[in-house]
């Protein structure tokens, strides 16, 4: 109803009035039903993005991609992805029609099932769409789930999400996911690299996040991130940078309850602000978002 009109194809997804046929919102991927046009959209996106990956994505992303049955010629079959992925880290890929309710999403993650959009964006939406489609979910997320650290971290997020919902602090936890799994950068020996799926599945943001003078790049600090709002409709104003992916291992162990209590007393932060305590790697010029605000 209020969701964007990226209607799932093939009539396989939701029943009448958008109600899911299965309680966990999964659908059949219906791989045989993808059209040549849909495979062609995948091919365009895959080839364009693969040219950007060397020197921009982290090592773990490249390793995961290399070992998966993902190529340019067709939209990957989730059954084949799951065979390889489950042997490596115990994760599976399941198809969903698009965004699913938070509790459904968390339950999948807590059980090492990654819900991936079944549909692919249309040829006139190559650069931007609101709902996660098969390109974002499979190209962006699945290679990172081949890495044991990310695999454990995303499961822990699913478990933490169910708790955070009960405590009424979900927005604070969702920011951790957003600024790591979706939009995280990591310092590697070769230089600053992308591990966030929202960046690595976007042509323009893969350039913006690493090379543009506009955004801030700040060392990741948990409480700081939990207070920081984010943008869902444009490039991020601030990216948070890990020293290494092992930082996520510690993060998965943290007891969030006392942190939720502490930050409850503190002001929320706008996406672009810098604080005196920040360990700033790049102080952004802010030019990009300033120009957007002018209209
Ligand atoms: N559903 N399919 C899908 N993919 C997401 O990334 C997703 C979702 N539902 C909720 C959600 N993300 C977020 O709002 C939570 O991480 C809070
Ligand atoms: Fe995502």
Image (cartoon, rainbow, N blue to C red):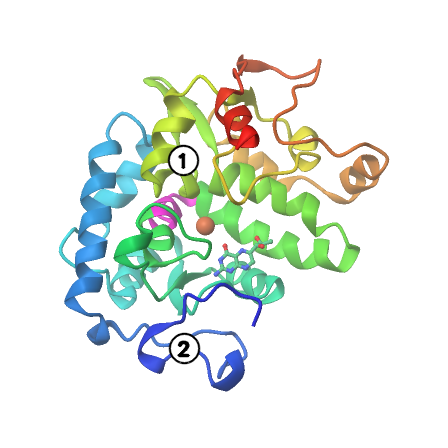
Residue 256 occupies quadrant = top right
Queried on whether the Cβ of the residue with tag 2 lies below 8 angstroms from ligand 1, the answer reads no
Which SS type dominates the magenta stretch?
A: helix
How many residues crowd mark 1 within 10 Å: few (<14), some (14–19), many (20+)? many
Of 101 and 163, which appears nearest the observer? 101
Judge the density around disc 2: few (<14), some (14-19), many (≥20) Cα neighbours within 10 Å: many
Secondary structure beneath disc 1? loop
Q: Earlier in the sequence, mark 2 or mark 1?
A: 2
Q: Is residue 15 above or below residue 203?
A: below
The residue shown at (75%, 50%) is: 169
| Relative to 91, residue 145 above or below | above
Using the rendered image of the protein, determine whether residue 236 is visible from the camera's viewpoint.
yes
Describe residue 4's horizontal placement relative to residue 90 as left or right.
right
The residue drawn where x is 35% and y is 66% is 118
Left-right relation of 137 to 20: left
Residues at marks 2 and 1, CA–CA distance in whole angstroms:
30 Å
Screen quadrant of the N terminus: bottom right
Q: Which residue is mark 1?
A: 195
Q: Residue furthest bottom?
A: 16
Residue 145, given in percent of the width and then of the height, sits at: 39, 49
Q: Which residue is mark 2?
A: 13
Q: Quadrant of residue 204?
A: top left
Residue 59 percent coordinates (x, y):
31, 31
Verify whether residue 36 appears in magenta.
no
Could you tell whether 254 is left or right of 59 in the image? right
Q: Where are the magenta residues, as a range?
A: 140-148
Q: Nearer the viewer, residue 13 or 124?
A: 124
Question: Residue at image x 75%, y 34%?
Answer: 268
């Amino acid at each position: 109803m209020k969701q964007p009109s990226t209607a799932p194809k093939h009539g396989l997804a939701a029943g009448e009035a958008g109600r899911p046929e299965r309680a966990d919102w999964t659908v059949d991927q219906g791989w045989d039903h993808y059209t040549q046009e849909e495979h062609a959209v995948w091919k365009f996106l895959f080839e364009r993005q693969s040219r950007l990956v060397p020197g921009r994505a982290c090592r773990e992303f490249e390793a995961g991609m290399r070992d998966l049955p993902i190529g340019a010629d067709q939209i990957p079959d989730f059954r084949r992805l799951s065979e390889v992925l489950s042997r490596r880290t115990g994760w599976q890929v399941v198809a969903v029609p698009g965004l699913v309710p938070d509790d459904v999403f968390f339950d999948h993650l807590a059980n090492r099932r990654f819900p991936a959009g079944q549909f692919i964006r249309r040829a006139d939406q190559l650069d931007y769409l609101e709902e996660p489609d098969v390109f974002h979910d499979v190209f962006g997320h699945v290679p990172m789930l081949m890495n044991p650290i990310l695999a454990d971290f995303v499961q822990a997020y699913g478990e933490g999400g169910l708790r955070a919902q009960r405590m009424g602090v979900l927005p604070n936890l969702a920011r951790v996911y957003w600024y790591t799994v979706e939009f995280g950068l990591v310092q590697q020996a070769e230089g600053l690299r992308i591990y966030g799926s929202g960046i690595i599945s976007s042509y323009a943001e893969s350039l913006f996040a690493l090379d543009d003078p506009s955004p801030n790049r700040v060392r990741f600090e948990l409480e700081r991130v939990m207070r920081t709002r984010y943008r869902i409709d444009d490039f991020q104003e601030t990216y948070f940078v890990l020293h290494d992916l092992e930082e996520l291992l510690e993060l998965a162990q943290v007891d969030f309850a006392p942190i939720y209590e502490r930050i409850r007393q503190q002001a929320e932060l706008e996406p672009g602000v810098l604080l005196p305590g920040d360990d700033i790697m790049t102080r952004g010029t802010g030019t990009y978002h300033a120009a957007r605000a002018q209209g």
